[in-house]
Image (cartoon, rainbow, N blue to C red):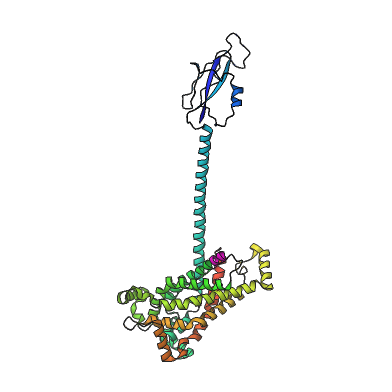
Amino acid sequence: MPKFHLQFKNSLPDYQPYLPFTSNSNLLVPGGLFIDPCFPSSLLDLVSPFKGSPPSKNTACVSRRQKRESVAVKDLFFLSVSLSSDGLVSEHKECQLQNELNKKNKGAVAQVKQKVRVTRRGAVNTTKHLWAGAIAAMVSRTFVAPLERLKLEYIVRGEQRNIFELVKKIALTQGLLGFWKGNLINVLRTAPFKAVNFYAYDTYRKQLLRLSGNEETTNSERFIAGAAAGITATVLCLPLDTIRTKLVAPGGEALGGVIGAFRHMIQTEGFFSLYRGLVPSIVSMAPSAAVFYSVYDMLKSAYLHSPEGRKRIQNMRQMGQDLNALDQLELGPVRTLLYGAIAGACAEVATYPFEVVRRQLQLQVQASKMGALATGLKIVEQGGIPALYAGLIPSLLQVLPSASISYFVYEFMKIVLKVN
């Protein structure tokens, strides 16, 4: 890059004009001065009338790396400017480059911090989302545990008594707490299952909506998101369900609880025995979750687009922060419970035969293990088509309050926990 050479020339030794500074002034000090190649030559001509004079011994070629020294100037002097290319980089461009680098570094750091903040917010929101689903499962399952116990008695033990005789038998032999037998493992199984299920459905539905570019999720997208959520939750949570079924089966009391049943199955049947019935579980859960979530969302969407629903949403927006958590439910408490019950009943009726086959597969030992289709045919041979719906009435009595309470508590907890 071109560089200035400064020449100090005593041009008028016999004439002393008035100067604004003394002859021994130290106003000029050595330093580097660099310009771009596009620096106009006309400006140089104006500055230096001695541009043609060769540099003499009095010429000071000043570099920015030299040590600062004072320059003694006698009499009148003129500044002569010449250009030489020595490959040096101009100071202002070095500063500009350094500033650009600093800006880039600051920008990169800011982007990293922004990504960290977004990641943290996303992780916190995911945790809250999962907790909302888990709490919903805990509350609903504990509330309907007696009905769940009756359903398992019909499916697993092959109970032939009517429901009133069965209730009397359990109360006389095991007491009141007998109706909550296996509820702990049921909660341990259901809480993570429902947490994953609810979270996966909302996540898949939002992704499908983003990919399609629609303003609202279609019914087919709801169905696909529900099926995918059911498969995801089944794969992650099936081992706990298998252990629970083993505990409530005849002889399950001798296994010594959850850990004992887990060890027994691993030692005697291998690790993959925990995933026994995976295929029928997926076949059962995928359509069940698809029907459950899609029916609820369709009912909810229909209401929100109705005049009554629009009026409710408008009133909620006007009230703003004055609303409590119950009033912030888009459907309201009663309608949330009702729509949850309807969705649960539809899902249960549509997929109950798969549930019966799955339970029977989980009870089979390795020596007499059969496939899902063979197990289903065997059930039909022994009891006919009604055998595939054994325990449906107590199951519906359990599903209706369970589904309504779970969806109500889930929507309520999302408001309380401020889930986005």
* Residue 149 visible in the displayed image: no
What x and y, as percent, mark residue 264?
A: 32, 76
Query: Along the horizontal axis of the image, is 252 left or right of 183?
Result: left
Q: Quadrant of the C terminus?
A: bottom right
Is residue 336 shown above or below 126? below
What x and y, as percent, mark residue 327?
A: 63, 69
Is residue 45 shown above or below 207? above
Q: Is residue 87 on the magenta stretch?
A: no
Which residue is located at x 60 percent, y 23 percent? 45
- Residue that protrudes farthest toward the top in the picture: 14
Please state the extent of the stretch shown in magenta in the rendering: 205-214
Total tally of numbered discs in the picture: 0
Which residue is located at x 50 percent, y 47 percent? 108
Q: Nearer the viewer, residue 170 or 366?
A: 366
Magenta span dominant secondary structure: helix
Q: Nearer the viewer, residue 204 or 41?
A: 41
What x and y, as percent, mark residue 254?
A: 33, 80
Which residue is located at x 48 percent, y 75 percent? 286
Q: Is residue 208 on the magenta stretch?
A: yes
* Residue 2 visible in the displayed image: yes
- Residue that protrudes farthest toward the left in the picture: 267
Is residue 254 shown above or below 136? below
What x and y, as percent, mark residue 410?
A: 54, 70
Is residue 197 shown above or below 394? above
- Residue that protrudes farthest toward the front in the picture: 52
Q: Nearer the viewer, residue 105 or 48?
A: 48
